Image: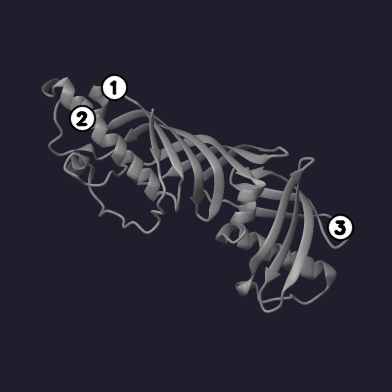
Amino acid sequence: MTRFPVTSDLSDLGQPAPISPEESQADLPQAQDVPRGQQRLIRRVLTPALRWWLQTQVEAVTELEIDLQAKDQQVLTGYLPLVRVLAVGVIFQGLCLTQARLQAENIRVNLGQVLRGKPLKLLEPIQAWGELHLTSADLQQSLDSDLMRSALRDLVVIFSQELDQPLPTALATLHVAEATVNFSHGALDCTLNLLGEQPFTISFASEIGLAGPQCLEFRQLRAFGLEPQTIQINLGENVHLETLRLTPEKLICEGGLTVFP
């Protein structure tokens, strides 16, 4: 297992130009023609290239551990049967994660270009499966992400309709100024100070579950003495969640994600 401390935010790195599978594998050496010392050298080149590619998929990551499971002959063809990744301190699409433990199988990469100093690219979509850990502090820091802001706008609209009150702020300008988030008794307790045209505060409690593989659901959401409400967040067709567990310390999600070249 290779361990890499990472301190920089790589979200602004440029994307390499598209390549064809034929071009990416051009001039690959044959396994029988490569001395074992050079095969080990190729692994030492491929692992940092894989690390760089993983960093470009997130906005920030504090630490990466990469476990590449492949025979030398497989590596020489650009085929990686199994890659396991442990990432700590991740920010992905504005969502903060204390830990992400993932693995993917049957990965094909442009090894021919990597050996010529080009960035690593996937040649085919892959399915990554694993487990994500979010603490209450992670969720608190994620509230200004696009995903959570969309959910907050839905929440404000529902409360305004139920209370028969005008919307307290322009939804487009809504953002979280201060938040308190706690996990307790299998539920989420949250107090949000929101800023927009007018500042206002929402306090609510909610259960969290799955309405489907792509849909996160806040159930029995209670605030302002209203009847319990339900809000759903669509996570996108590339996500496939299987289980979601809330403990007093963190939210644990298990499932998969399709990653495209």
Across and down, in percent, residue 13 comes to 34, 56
Circle 2 is placed at which residue position?
A: 41
In the rendered view, tell whether residue 172 sits above or below residue 211.
below
Q: Quadrant of residue 230?
A: bottom right
C-alpha distance separating marks 1 and 2: 14 Å
Q: Is there CB contact under 8 Å for labels 1 and 3?
A: no
> Who comes first in sequence, dot 2 or dot 3?
2
Q: Does residue 121 appear to the left or right of 84 in the view shown?
A: left
Depth-wise, is mark 1 or mark 2 nearer the camera? 2
Q: Residues within 10 Å of mark 3 (few under 14, many from 20)?
A: few
Q: Secondary structure at mark 1?
A: loop
Circle 1 is placed at which residue position?
A: 71
Across and down, in percent, residue 242 comes to 60, 36
As shown in the figure, which amino acid type bears the numbered disc 2?
Leu
Q: Report if residue 77 is visible in the image.
A: no
In the rendered view, tell whether residue 147 sits above or below residue 73.
below
C-alpha distance separating marks 2 and 3: 64 Å
Across and down, in percent, residue 7 comes to 42, 48
**Could you tell me which residue is drawn at 77 percent across and 43 percent down?**
184
Q: Quadrant of residue 241?
A: top right
Q: Quadrant of residue 99?
A: top right
Q: Does residue 5 appear to the left or right of 158 in the view shown?
A: left
Picture disc at residue 227: 3
Give the mark count.
3
Q: Secondary structure at mark 3?
A: loop
Q: Secondary structure at mark 2?
A: helix
Residue that protrudes farthest toward the bottom in the picture: 197
As shown in the figure, which amino acid type bears the numbered disc 1?
Lys
Please tell me which residue lies in front, 199 or 219. Answer: 199
Across and down, in percent, residue 252 comes to 63, 38
Q: Quadrant of the N terminus?
A: top left
Q: Does residue 233 appear to the left or right of 158 in the view shown?
A: left
